[in-house]
Image (spheres, grey):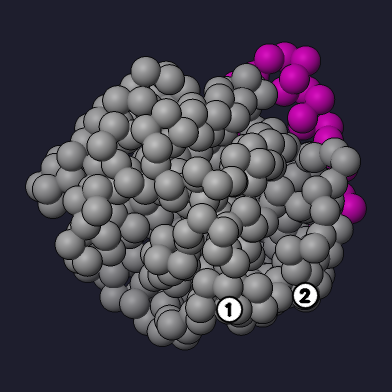
Amino acid sequence: MRVLVTGGNGFLGQAIVRRLLARGDMVRSLQRSASLELETLGVDCVKGDIADAAIVQQAAAGCQAVFHVAAKAGVWGRYDDYHHANVIGTRNVIAACQSHRICKLIYTSSPSVVFNGKDEVGIDESVSYPSSYLAHYPLTKAIGERMVMTANGDQLATVSLRPHLIWGPGDNHLVPRLIQRARSGQLRQVGNGKNLVDTTYIDNAADAHLLAFDRLEIGSKAAGKAFFISNEEPQPLWDLINRLLACADVAPITGRISATTAYAVGGVLETIYTLTRRTDEPRMTRFVARQLSTAHWFRLDAARRDLGYVPRITIEEGLRRLTESLKSTSVGSREQDLACDRVPGLPDGSS
């Protein structure tokens, strides 16, 4: 089968691409920049903007399924930029599936599409979308998810996956960002540190996508549904953050700020940045303050029942693998620290 993966050169995208190739599928990737690594693997790479309808149509031609992984993530920026990638881009992918008679669309969403700023304790997919959002990313991802769910029908089967905080070897976002901020003294524990949060090891996230690919058919149990995906191992967020930092021999976080203060500071900074039209990311936002101080863990009954999803790699094993990977790649080098300064967003609710 020929499969299109949008954002195939990203962290999750590459993991999915490698799984597909290992199974013998032919893979095409649509991405904004060239990737020698993917080309070396034999991937048919198409360079272009997901919001360019003509490019998406070109990339989808001849494919039988699409993994729509590409998105603009982050906690700050212009709404138009998020809408451009996450709404217009998703609309283009759906249109390409319909015009090329592609029967399977697997959409990478985020648990943040249902985040209302409060604790999420053992919630399932029955939780509705909130009436308002604290950031453009979850809002536009929710719009995209609704579009994907609406597109499900007798010609195209769609499914939406909501993996929470993906991490592991090869991560170029979450873990490097945490390391850089901790080493520069910019990271503080927000809240009392007792908020339970579940995360997703990269291999488990990729497993969920391939299981959805295999189970998704017109009229199947998975069609037209959204599923939370995680490791099913909720634990105190700041304990896990310190364990992730320990993988790179970084000292644990000792500084603290109350959740109320962090939220207030985030609101002030957002106002200042908006009024002065600054484009760089504030040290704190209201969304980040809530994300880092509230609980986020989910029931996986639906994913287990309809997708056959069971997380294979535990957090303990994932941490061991991450430690080995960081040692072999020297992630703590000054060059990578500088690169991390350009990575947007501290932990959001997404992939």
Q: How crowded is mark 2: few (under 14 residues within 10 Å), some or many (20 or more)?
A: few
Where residue 132 sits, quadrant-wise, is top right
Q: Which mark, residue 304?
A: 1
Could you tell whether 259 is left or right of 351 in the image?
Answer: right
Could you tell whether 288 is left or right of 252 in the image?
Answer: right
Residue 14 in view: yes
Range of magenta residues = 257-281
Residue on which the image places disc 2: 122
Residue 145 in view: no
Q: Residues within 10 Å of mark 1 (few under 14, many from 20)?
A: some
**What's under tag 1, amino acid-wise?**
Arg
279 drawn magenta: yes
Where residue 191 sits, quadrant-wise, is bottom right
Nearest the eye: 243 or 68: 68
Q: Which mark, residue 270?
A: none
Q: Which of marks 1 and 2 is nearer the N terminus?
A: 2
Residue 264 position within the rendered picture, expressed as x and y whole percent measured from the top left: 87, 42
**What's under tag 2, amino acid-wise?**
Gly
Q: What element carries label 2?
A: strand
Q: Residue at x 72, y 23 (%)?
A: 273
